[in-house]
Amino acid sequence: MAKALLLVGLGLGWGCSPAPSEPTPARSTTTATRSANPDTRRVVVVINTKSPDSQAVGAYYMDKRGIPADAVINISCPPGEEISREEFDRAIATPVREKIKQLGRRTDFVVLTQGVPIRIGDKWGPSVDSMLAGVPSPIKPITTINAENVNGAVHPYFQADEPFNSEKFSMWLVTRLTGPTVADAKALVDRSLKAEAGKGPFLFDQAANRNTDDYARLQTRMSEAVANLNRRGFQAELDEKPAFAAPGQPLMGYVSWGSNDGAFRADVYRQIKFKPGAIAETFVSTSARTFGPAQGGQSLIADLIRGGVTGVKGYVSEPYTFAMADPQVLFDRYTRGYTLAESFYAASPILKWKDLVIGDPICRPYPQKPSETGS
């Protein structure tokens, strides 16, 4: 269950669940023709040389996106899903920091690939991705769940309504290309390149058992996201019916409570399909705990990747509701021309925590527009 906590100054209240006590890839000759997107100069790609999957996905992304050859960062660590804090610092954070410094150009986006660990194995179990995003930041990781610690971990790009600049915000936007298989990870790249500025449909599926305390705040933000999208000419639906929503057509956007919905049906969830460029969030505590085979437990974003989503956020261990992506901010930014990475990070408050964003960070299907609604 996604647990709730007071987040002072951000309008996030207590919920009904108590908080606890205190090698460089081979390049195709066609790459040069794909480098017109200026965002590619702000990307680095992290490849684990001990993982053939990582090498395959990294090479595929760099070729298809036209990422400069010098932007690859080779690391060497065990390819399992968990890594120790010491190994993270030595094998991931240090080489990434040093290579970005060596490049001598502004780097805003860091792409991790299948075969790079997802979680650090300590008391709190933070994600590799969120910890890496915070390497340039003075923000300290949450070590005790209280308002002071949580507020201290709010990053400066949260709710921002301007293009991301790592030099201004002292962090990187880290996303990941992974899935149940290498083919699934590569398909994320293909869908990003095929993404179109679809008017919808966008589905926001509320849950009848999530109308109290801080859960109600997320329900309200779903309603506000729908109102904002519809006001701007998009096709968005707020599903308030008791049954777990079963969309009849591929979606451009999706938010639900996943298996936290009392009416959840795994068969329906696994049949959801998406259009190229679609993004999603589910308010599920361990939705990114694994991308491998799983028996039981909470719903997984891996199923949405199989269903064709282009970008999705998940959590490698219990994040509490204060860490969930704000659906109003997420879809407002994305449909106004912000990149996939900018949209998810602007919607997500906490750095050095449990978050994991899947997808090509520079996916940008919508034309850039000035602010129409604010946050």
Image (spheres, rainbow, N blue to C red):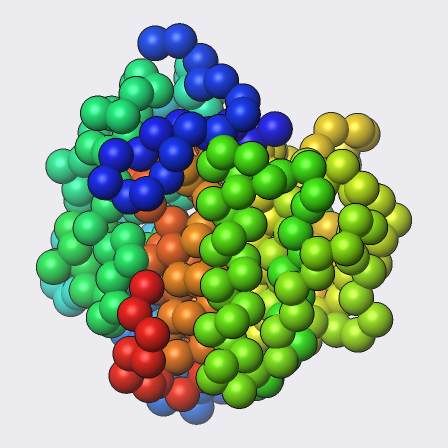
The one nearer the camera, 136 or 364, is 364
Query: Looking at the image, which residue is at 49% across and 18% down?
Result: 18
Query: Looking at the image, which residue is at 45% across and 18% down?
Result: 19
Quadrant assignment, res 94: top left
Query: Looking at the image, which residue is at 47% across and 36% down?
Result: 214
Q: Position of residue 193 (x, y in %)?
A: 55, 80
**Where, quadrant-wise, is the N terminus in this rendering?**
top right
Position of residue 33 in the picture relative to residue 186 (left or right): left
Q: Position of residue 100 (x, y in %)?
A: 21, 54
Q: Visible in this render: residue 336?
A: yes
Vertical comparison of 175 with 9: above or below:
below
Position of residue 22 in the picture relative to residue 312 (left or right): left
The one nearer the camera, 67 or 151, is 151
The one nearer the camera, 97 or 317, is 317
Vertical comparison of 182 with 65: above or below:
above
Q: Position of residue 41 (x, y in %)?
A: 28, 73
Q: Position of residue 180 (x, y in %)?
A: 70, 48
The one nearer the camera, 80 or 55, is 80
Vertical comparison of 81 with 175: above or below:
above
Q: Visible in this render: residue 45?
A: no
